[in-house]
Amino acid sequence: MRLFTAIDLPVEMLEKIGAFLARLRPLAKLRWTPVENLHITTKFIGEWPEARIGEMIAALEPLVTNPPHIAIRGVGWFPNTRRPHTFWAGVDGGEALVALARSTEQAVARLGVPVENRVYSPHLTLARVKDKVRIEDVIAAAGEPDFGAFQATSFFLYLSAHGKYSKLAEFPLNS
């Protein structure tokens, strides 16, 4: 089982992002992320034995953290516009989102999940570059979008299989 934890986006925000992507899709042949798959990853867990799913849920249940206020705005390219690989939207969740990611990391590390060495950099992956493609039109049309903000009230344990995501458990955020 391939697992990760994430925060879902409100429906209204997904609709705004969906309209934005619909406007950009015709401008470049990218592998666009389906809107229903957009989420804010807090921890990529990776492969996990199905027989141990109860352990994973038990490790995540006791997490206590302030519910983050999250704003989604701006777009960019990883690693840069000269060698684009990923088109992303910015996620600003402040210290509360960083704390949730850190707590999740620590909880699953106790089960043997490898600790991520990179700094947590929340973003929404809007598209991936398949082949060398002109992105200038996308850059010009994208502008500096502001998709709004919301208060996260829970996060989820997800299963990723064949490009589809399924929720396995929900964890409320309490301070």
Image (tube, helix red, strand yellow):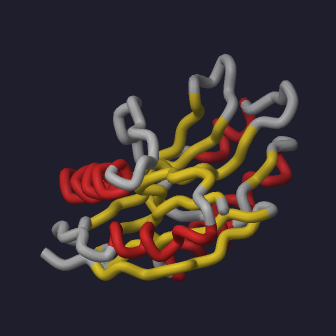
- Vertical order, 81 against 156 (above or below): above
Question: In the rendering, at what x and y percent does residue 37 appear?
Answer: 65, 66
Report the front residue among 95 and 19: 95
Question: In the rendering, at what x and y percent does residue 25 appear?
Answer: 79, 54
Q: Is residue 152 visible?
A: yes
The quarter of the rendered structure image containing the C terminus is bottom left
- Vertical order, 18 against 29 (above or below): below
Where is residue 58, by image quadrant? bottom left
Report the front residue among 22 and 51: 51
Which residue is drawn at the image coordinates 43% and 81% (left, top)?
A: 170
The quarter of the rendered structure image containing the N terminus is bottom right
Which residue is drawn at the image coordinates 49% and 70% (left, top)?
A: 157
Q: Is residue 9 visible?
A: no
Question: In the rendering, at what x and y percent does residue 134 appear?
Answer: 81, 28
Question: In the rendering, at what x and y percent does residue 57 appear?
Answer: 42, 74
Q: Is residue 1 left or right of residue 104?
A: right
Report the front residue among 81 and 118: 118
Tally the marks. Answer: 0
Which residue is drawn at the image coordinates 53% and 68% (left, top)?
A: 52
- Vertical order, 135 against 2 (above or below): above
Q: Is residue 165 left or right of residue 42?
A: right
Q: Residue furthest front?
A: 51
Q: Residue furthest left?
A: 175
Which residue is drawn at the image coordinates 74% and 64% (left, top)?
A: 161
